Amino acid sequence: MWLMGTDFRYQYANSWFRQMDKFIHYVNQDGRVNALYSTPSIYTDLKHAADEEWLLKTEDFFPYADHPNAYWTGYFTSRPAFKGYVRLMSGYYLAARQLEFFKGRNSSGPNTDALADALAIAQHHDAVSGTERQHVAADYALRLSIGYKEAEKLVASSLASLAESTSNIRQGNTVINFQQCPLLNISYCPPSEADLSDGKSLLVVVYNPLGWKREEVIRIPVSTEKVVVRDSSGGEIESQLLPISNATPHIRRKYVKAYLGKFPREALKYWLAFSASLPPLGFNTYIVSGAKQTGPRSTISLVQTSNESTNETIEVGQGSLKLLYSADEGKLTHYLNSRSLVTSTAGQSYSYYTGNDGTDKDPQASGAYVFRPNSTLPIKPQYQVPLTVMRGPLLDEVHQQLNSWISQVTRVYKGKEHAEVEFTIGPIPVDDGTGKEITTQITTTIKSNRTFYTDSNGRDFIKRVRDSRTDWELQVNQPIAGNYYPVNLGIYIQDNSTELSLLVDRSVGGSSLVDGQIELMLHRRLLHDDARGVGEVLNETVCVLDRCEGLTIQGKFFLRIDQLGEGARWRRTFGQEIYSPVLLAFTEQDGSTEMNFPLPTFSGIDPSYSLPNNVAVITLQELENGKVLLRLAHLYETGEDKDYSVMASVELKMLFPKKKIVEVTELSLSANQERTDMEKKRLVWKVEGSTGEEPKVVRGGPVDPAKLVVELAPMEIRTFHVDFDHLQMFGS
């Protein structure tokens, strides 16, 4: 067998294949060798037929290098805005498919197909990776935007249909017109910014795509502080007004113009926050209306700066979690949890690596693929900037401006035991002719012994040891880049008593370069190509009115410190909340019509049921033939948690309470063949050193057609076609 070709080959396909056809023809004419164009399956079958023994590898191949100073660890963060967009659209697509099923798929009208295609294309190894040219990245984003707009119509019509079927919300013959806010993160949401005078109100539908109940603090921008929030039964609920951070108005104005071609109205002053209680695979409805002069209204956050503090320490947090800050330095110093009794020193800092430009002797530069730092420089405030703390009944916020191009807001929610850090970075200055790669560090006293753990595609967590490889003795040429790994879901460190976990809202690069510390790379802007085929520098810019400047990104990461062994539950449960954010839809209610309570609520599963805490719905999609594609995943690894790393069960009758299931067929993971057929064709390989007595892998058993219960073993994902009797519906 000959391996042929590599990247950048066969551009002249006609010439290449004409020569290869001749070669194959004359080799076969000789008769001693059979030459053919092979395929992966043919190659695999022939290697299996060779009956050789193979070494067993259980880890992955990160980090990869093709040269002593060329570690391909830069692309873990390259194009962070596009990485965030893909993650956001993935969660939206999952929710949209669910709503498409609950409403019923139509042969015509809006659907999720265009978004599915765009997301599939974005998985190309030079797409979401950030290693394409700028105009190609723009095309990927355009495809996602087109797919989103089509899916947005489907979501709006599905929510309207479900809302009207569960309540008397419709006014006359008018169909509810739901709007959505894809630029909500930069405080742009026209329906929530509407004037609520003259008795008008804003109806907010909050959809939960997870299979279990959920408490979520919703934040929307509002134009007035005189507002009140009511739940679906009409009762007033606690709400809080938070001043919008200083960095947001500039981003709002610039990026709304860049994306929509128009400037937004004047900047708003407040975020309105309220807590939503959501059913599994369902929605709840809330009303935001103008507050009467003497009636109840939302609580305005108490604003305090570190200059006003008479104490050396500022305490932030309304619940069991408390963050302590130094008043004079404005830095995080401690993390305290009164429930778990965790008390830990903790600090946060920012720094940047200067990108290596390469030399005549070694021309390798830092670029879209390659991370090659030249030096590390801490980012210190240009002057002493006081902390600004917002306090209220639902959450506390800490606003910090580190310099002219880095700011962040740290949030501590009353009912949560983690901190949320929202960072705004950019434009990264390059006037000095130096590319920069921006990182943040969370530092503790955990004795992690060079060891940390990163996720593999959001599933298993793999043990990483600094400056070490399990398969060979590593020569350390790049002590920083050679210890970076992809972080898709999270990264954590631990010692014999404590563990620190960080979860991310998009894929980034990360490491633990110092014991007790976790580092994430959040943004990159470079001025040299790394010579891996792109032929273009990684220097993203945004242009408004013929003025171009470097890309500004806004993202989040989440941190939590636990007693040893307790962090897995948060990583798994909250990780699903990050992957599947709530979906918001808005419609304005005219003040001329009295609001009829209760407002619509909906759950797609039996109201008495929710999925086990260790199981997630990965796919719930109605197919064109009327069947449903259902994919369920166990969230825990074996031994990861004493209570949840066990066999889990899902009752399909409860998952589809209004439908009669007539057949359940298990498929392969990719759903392209039945599982029984796949297992008949599965190859058994000889493993070097094997005794033939390896323990059998535990898997869930067959689905009993009478009981209709799906079993899932730790880390197992199972895929099914579910067929219904469409003539027999229950409760409809």
Image (cartoon, rainbow, N blue to C red):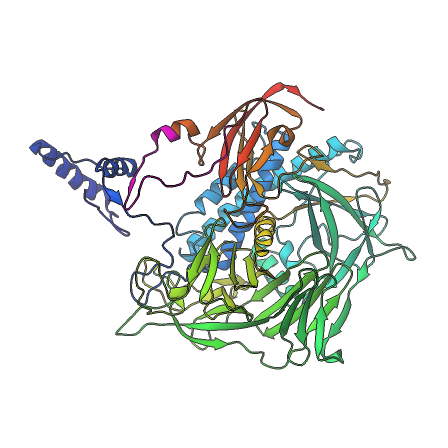
Work out which residue is located at the far top of the displayed protein and give it: 727
> In the displayed structure, would residue 612 be above or below residue 73?
above
Q: Say which residue appears at 83% left-offset and 58% top-offset.
A: 226
Query: Magenta span: helix, strand or loop, mainly?
Result: loop
* Magenta extent: 679-702
Residue 616 visible? The answer is: yes
Residue 509 visible? The answer is: no
> In the displayed structure, would residue 729 be above or below residue 38?
above
Q: Where, quadrant-wise, is the N terminus in this rendering?
A: top left
Horizontal and vertical percent for residue 159? 68, 37
Q: Say which residue appears at 37% left-offset and 65% top-offset.
A: 482
Horizontal and vertical percent for residue 171? 80, 35
Q: Is residue 129 left or right of residue 180?
A: left
In magenta segment, residue 365: no
Q: Say which residue appears at 73% left-offset and 48% top-offset.
A: 276
> In the displayed structure, would residue 205 be above or below residue 623?
below
Q: Is residue 675 left or right of residue 230?
A: left
> In the displayed structure, would residue 702 be above or below residue 229?
above
In magenta segment, residue 698: yes
Work out which residue is located at the far right of the displayed protein and give it: 294
Q: Where, quadrant-wise, is the C terminus in this rendering?
A: top right
Closer to the camera in the image, 639 or 44: 639
Work out which residue is located at the far left of the displayed protein and give it: 30
Q: Quadrant of residue 205?
A: top right
Horizontal and vertical percent for residue 493? 51, 62
- The number of numbered badges drawn on the structure is 0
Q: Is residue 438 left or right of residue 239?
A: left
Q: Is residue 563 left or right of residue 141?
A: right
Horizontal and vertical percent for residue 203? 76, 45
